[in-house]
């Protein structure tokens, strides 16, 4: 089955509801949403409003009980494995334990390895790793074990790991949570708009709307598992 790429939407959700295993109440209910390609969407709402559930449903990590989803033209969850090869996802739970031995450059390289035969990186792949380390501003951390880094440094490493894939769709779940103000400003005003200009669609979850990304064209507000407001700008 070939993906349907006849429209200009990166993500389409039609009446989607998702339940967690064993639960009788849906985590998200009757979600109708279209996210244009090459746009930057901000997803906001209080804790427990369903933001993370929505991201995981879009990616096919959670199976919806009702409704239809298309991700980059692919039907989800049926073709989720194909669609996810073109996606990057930075979840909230990114911290590695102090004893984690992998070096920063190795962790970032894992973002490419998942799409390579036998996970082997070639010289061109390692060049991409170096480029994204510089892009995120952590080139100086390349040879340090990730477990020895601060929370903010680790968050930048994990961001670099998803960016090295050059995703068509980037999903960021609270990407500012461990960062200082300067790093947050750089990502919101420089990095994310640049990604969109280069053809990426970005969905960013955030509690802190004071750092609304530059060129954000769509703000979606959730509460109690439902979309309660959609603002286009």
Image (cartoon, grey):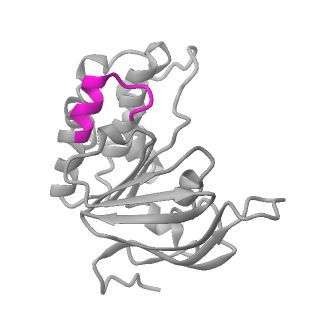
At 33% from the left edge and 22% from the top edge, which residue is drawn?
A: 180
Residue drawn 27% across and 27% down?
183
> Residue 14 appears at what percent x and percent y?
52, 80
Q: Which residue is located at x 45 percent, y 41 percent?
A: 207
Instruction: Label the magenta part by its dominant secondary structure.
Output: helix
In this view, the residue in front, 190 or 73, is 190
x, y percent for residue 10: 35, 70
Q: Is residue 103 visible?
A: no
Q: On the picture, is 176 further left or further right than 51?
A: left
Decide: is 212 above or below 135. Answer: below
Q: Is residue 189 above or below residue 217?
A: above
Relative to 51, residue 80 above or below:
below
In the image, is residue 186 part of the stretch drawn in magenta? yes
Say if the magenta span includes residue 215. Answer: no
**The C terminus - image quarter:** bottom left
Q: Is residue 102 visible in this depiction of the protein?
A: yes
Asked if residue 46 lies left or right of residue 74, the reply is right
Numbered range of the magenta stretch: 176-188
Q: Specify whether 66 is left or right of 100.
A: right
Q: Is residue 154 above or below residue 71?
A: above
| Residue 29 coordinates in the image, percent (x, y) | 63, 69
Of 207 and 160, nearer the camera is 207
**Residue 36 falls in image quadrant:** bottom left
Horizontal and vertical percent position of residue 5? 33, 82
Residue 40: quarter of image:
bottom left
Q: Which residue is depicted at the point 27% across and 36% down?
A: 129
């Amino acid at each position: 089955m070939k993906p349907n790429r006849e429209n200009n939407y990166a993500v389409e959700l039609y009446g989607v509801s998702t339940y967690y295993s064993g639960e009788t109440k849906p985590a998200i209910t009757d979600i109708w949403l279209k996210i244009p390609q090459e746009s930057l969407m901000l997803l906001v709402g209080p804790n427990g409003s369903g933001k993370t559930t929505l991201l995981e449903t879009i990616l096919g990590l959670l199976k919806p009980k009702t409704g239809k989803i298309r991700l980059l033209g692919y039907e989800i969850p049926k073709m989720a494995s194909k669609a996810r090869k073109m996606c990057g996802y930075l979840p909230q739970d990114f911290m590695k334990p102090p004893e984690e031995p992998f070096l920063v450059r190795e962790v970032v390289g894992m973002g490419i390895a998942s799409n390579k035969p036998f996970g082997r990186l070639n010289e061109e792949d390692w060049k991409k790793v170096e480029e994204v380390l510089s892009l995120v501003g952590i080139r100086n951390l390349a040879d340090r074990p990730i477990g020895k880094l601060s929370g903010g440094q680790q968050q930048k490493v994990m961001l670099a790991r998803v960016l090295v894939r050059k995703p068509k769709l980037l999903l960021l779940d609270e990407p500012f949570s461990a960062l200082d103000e300067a790093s947050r400003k750089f990502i919101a005003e420089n990095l994310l708009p640049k990604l969109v200009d280069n053809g990426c669609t970005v969905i960013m979850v955030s509690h802190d709307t004071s750092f609304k990304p530059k060129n954000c064209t769509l703000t979606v507000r959730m509460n109690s598992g439902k979309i309660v407001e959609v603002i286009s700008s």
